[in-house]
Image (cartoon, rainbow, N blue to C red):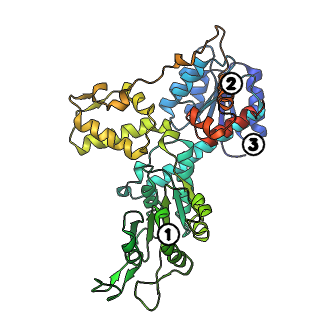
Amino acid sequence: MTGNRILVVDDDESLRRVVQVQLQQARYEVTTAADGQQALALLERSPQDLVISDLKMPGLCGIDLLKRIKADCPETIVIMMTAFGTVESAVEAMKLGAYDYLTKPVNADALRMVVGRALEHHRLIEEVQNLRSSLDRKYGFENMIGRSSALLYTLDTAARAAQSDSTVLIRGETGTGKELLAKGIHFNSPRKNGPFVTINCGAIPRELLESELFGHVKGAFTGAVAHKKGRVEMADGGTVFLDEIGELPPELQVKLLRLIQEREIDKVGATAPIKVDVRILAATNRNLQAMVEDGAFREDLYYRLAVIPLELPPLRERPEDIPELVQHFFEKGRQKHGRAELALSPSLVPYFTSYRWPGNVRELENVIERVVVLARGDEITINDLPDFLRRERPALEALQLELPPHGISLEAVEKELLLRALKKFDWNQTQAARYLDISRKTLIYRMEKYGLKEGS
């Protein structure tokens, strides 16, 4: 058995049995319940990793069961089943915390795929929580808040990478938290008692960068009146974090490659190299692979840096994390500025989730701090929000959706929307993904899910 415990809830005995057998064949531990009340009783006696529940049941319906589970067992993943497939019920279930939903009759392959994905999500949540509890919180790793699959995957990989001495390349847009992640890796590594030294390769003048990195000896150049340790040497026994590594000049890329390979540096003006013991973490918001192709970045250095590549997703690709981030930064702002009486209405959260946040988490934090500081009363109102958050957004009705009286399949609607977007841009996946406000990876996954190919 896999050790994953699943509870299947449905008033249809034959369907319960079919789903149970399919999951047992996939080596899951499966329990069944005929209604919501029986399911709650079972959950009290034996916690489950995952609950698969019908939406329409006599007595306690699936939506009410979902609410109770999220209130009493918030770590339990819930997947809903429905024979109706209505937009309203599916959307309501997802808003209340359901991980996903399945339409009846349940396809065996779809069932195994969704369950596997949900349990992997559950595992990542547990691992990241264990990682967070083991980190020294004063270094800000707790600000990497969220439970989206993309973020959890990155944090899970970072947790495992921290135990090694391998170089790590962190890629992500400005404001996504690359330095926070680097600190988290360092302070959860065997080097945590050593120094953590940050070098912003784009902020130091080019003519001074070599001396800042590797140091110099007295008389090496005009103004070098004494020996100077470079920041790499200062990090001996610890970690060097090279931020904006894409800005490193070609002549210094050679010296960095030597540092990684030989664990030694050449000070400016010195006649012999010196040994150093440092771990290299690097970060960039640029496409280093494209720079390699253009000859602007050394290929051998790129592969030395990207032994363990980590990708921090932009905030627009994990909007489900925004409410939790908003609450965290709001509480932080209240404490920082002495506004313990200030309240933030949940009705304002959609204004934050609908914005794309080009400056990512850093921009969100700054906006919330501004709102906390400038709020006029004891409760933040819509008038306290910046103009760009208050601007009206297109209503759903603008899509001119006609909802049939007997219900509609959400999967069919999604498939049709994907198909129309792809055709609109002549099957250009990048443009279609941007139009739908999703990542290209997400688009490709959904195309494979629905079997969408050019010409279909």
Label 3 neighbourhood size at 10 Å, few (<14), some (14-19), many (20+)? few
Which mark is drawn over residue 416?
2
Quadrant of res 114:
top right
Q: Earlier in the sequence, mark 3 or mark 2?
A: 3
Residue type for callout 3: Arg
In depth, the one of 150 and 190 nearer the eye is 150
Q: Position of residue 265 (x, y in %)?
A: 47, 82
- Please state which of residues 12 and 129 is positioned toward the viewer in this rendering: 129
**Which corner quadrant of the image does residue 227 belong to?**
bottom left
**Tally of marks:** 3
Residue at image coords 26%, 28%? 379
Relative vertical location of residue 136 with respect to residue 97 in this rendering, above or below: below
According to the picture, the residue beneath numbered tag 1 turns out to be 280
Residue 407 placement, left or right of 344: right
Give the amino acid at mark 1: Ile
Dot in front, 3 or 1: 1
Instruction: Determine whether, in the image, residue 16 is placed left or right of residue 274.
Output: right
| Residue 294 percent location from the top left of the image | 59, 62
The secondary element bearing badge 3 is classed as: loop
Identify the element where label 1 is drawn.
Answer: strand
Residue 275 position, x and y percent, is: 47, 84
**Compared with residue 191, is residue 336 higher up or lower down, i.e. above or below?**
above
Residue 91 picture location, percent across and down: 56, 23
The amino acid at mark 2 is Glu
3 and 2 marks in contact (CB < 8 Å): no
**Residue 204 vs residue 312: left or right?**
left
The quadrant the C terminus occupies is: top right
Mark 2 residue crowding within 10 angstroms, few (<14) / some (14–19) / many (20+): some
Mark 1 in CB contact with mark 2 (< 8 angstroms)? no
Q: Which residue is mark 3?
A: 27
